Amino acid sequence: GKSCPMPRIVALMLLALFCGRARALVAPRASRVARAWPRTALRCASSSSQTEKSEEEKERLKAERDARKAAKQAAKEAKAAKKAAEAAAQAEPVLQKIGILDTALQEEQKCGDYDLVASQGITGREFVDLSSVSSAMDGQQIWIRARVQNVRAKGGSAFLVLRQGAFDTIQALFFKDKEDPEMSKRMLKYLGGLSAESVVDIYGTLKSAEVKSCSISDVELAVEQCFLVSAAEAILPFQQEDAARTAEEVEASQGTERPFPRIGQELRLDNRWLDVRVPANNAIMRLRSGVCRLYRESLYSHGFTEIQTPKLIGGESEGGSEVFRTDYFGKPACLAQSPQLYKQMAISADLNRVFEIGPVFRAEQSNSRRHLCEFTGLDLEMQINEHYSEVFPVIHSTFKRIFHGLEEQHAKEISIVREQYPTVPAVISDEPVVIHFKDGLEMLRDAGVEDVEEFGDLSNSQEQELGRLVKEKFNTDFFILDQYPSAVRPFYTMPNPEDPRYSNSYDMFIRGMEICSGAQRIHDPELLKKTILSKGLLVDTFADYIKSFEHGCCPHAGGGFGLERVVTLYLGLDNVRKSVMFPRDPSRLTP
């Protein structure tokens, strides 16, 4: 080794060179690693910051989305509002209120809503009654005021059924006019928007046509102008066509795909003004009026005088307990159960024969189909010469006049009622059919009726059975049951002079239901006092009534009928409430 030192030196130099390069190689790497640590930390911090910002970003983005959505909705609403405004602007000529006297504007607009008709003046127009319209008027131009019963508007046509009153209907129609498309477009839109039961004035031309769906079947009305007088609500409690169906129709439809709605009695009575627009119910009200008129005419022809008696009276009415009591300036008072006591005072006043048509009040807690708390009484009283039966021919002839008069003068109304409420016409005999109470009981017993009381009143079912038996035997629905037991009659009833267990009293019936209670009245003041006491009443309560007989009074007799029962039974209706406009019973005080 000593002889050759150079290789050793070279080796050392190579080793030093290698170590230096290694340091050179390691140092930069360490430096890079050292420099990389801050960047890594920064990246971690940045990543954490980005995570936090992403939540904020989400909130920001959500807010932006909500804002864009709200803006979009606002734009949509603005567009809709603009469209509605444009539509309103286009419809403004139609919706403009038109004065009923502004005929020039009416001629220009052709259709629209009247301003309030408040008797501003007179146009001079002649409105036509639909009952007078026929095909003989073909080509005539007319004005009519009527209700819109229904409307069908589609495409370029509109068909309306117009109704006057409850009975008369006509078809009206309008077609798109190519010569005036804007006007016809407005007219079609206007007609299509009319609600059922609204009142309109329509001007148009009558044209011959076959229309089976209306009462006027040979002519229709081509509409030229239409103006709304009174608008009905778009949704009514019930439809007229549904309320006019028979009970059989409604029941038969149940279980089908399209059953007819049942319009109950309470709903009808709550909206009675709508219910009475139904043809049958409207006809009943007119027949009711006819009964009153015929009753008056008959009694006038028999020499009667119409009177009006007080309905507010002191104390008790006829001594009954079923009265409506009230206060009369600190004094007890009640509503009259009948005009009975005052009718008799009128006889004492030498009016001889009197009658009254007026309200009667009964505080009876009964909701039956035949009872009301307020009804209209048809009362009469007359002097008699020898026997109370003198009243029978007067009353019988009056009811013959009512029955026959209704058939002759109100055939249309009767027919309309029977379309919805089918029944067999009531029959009245030429002469009065008078049956003694005892004989009536015997007829019932012979027919197998049990629990017939000798000195009691008849039950409803017994009355109906007796009515059936009388109709079968005498062919009459109207009859008189005479000589009722005294125990079931009022204190003013004259007892039978031969058998005081019975009385000179009677009831009258139609179709087996009582319509009248009558009697000879006691005109002797002493006998009257005795009967008052026998009924457990106070004589002093009837002091004025008794005094009228103490001043002298002719023998007299009479009776009182319930108008609603007469109408109900004549027409064969199932409930007395159908025969009164606004019935009052224990559960109804409105409308």
Image (cartoon, rainbow, N blue to C red):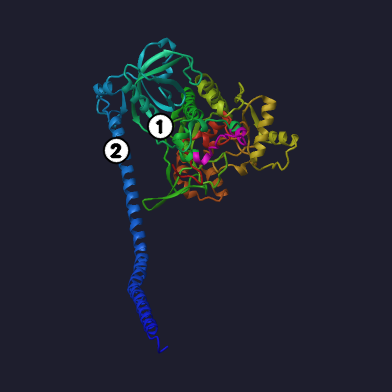
**Vertical side of 474 occupied by 133: above or below:** above
Mark 1 = which residue? 195
**Viewer can see residue 572:** yes
What amino acid is at disc 2? Answer: Lys
Q: Quadrant of residue 233?
A: top left
What secondary structure is the stretch in magenta mostly built from? loop
| Residue 252, percent from left and from top | 62, 32
Nearest the viewer among 387 and 467 is 467
What amino acid is at disc 1? Answer: Ser
Numbered disc 1: secondary structure: loop
Q: Residues within 10 Å of mark 2 (few under 14, many from 20)?
A: few
| Residue 74, percent from left and from top | 31, 46
Mark 2 = which residue? 82
Residue at far bottom of view: 2
Can residue 254 be found in the magenta stretch? yes
Q: Quadrant of residue 483?
A: top right
Can residue 175 be found in the magenta stretch? no
**Vertical side of 459 occupied by 572: above or below:** above
| Residue 186, percent from left and from top | 33, 26
Span colored in magenta: 250-267
Q: Residues within 10 Å of mark 1 (few under 14, many from 20)?
A: some
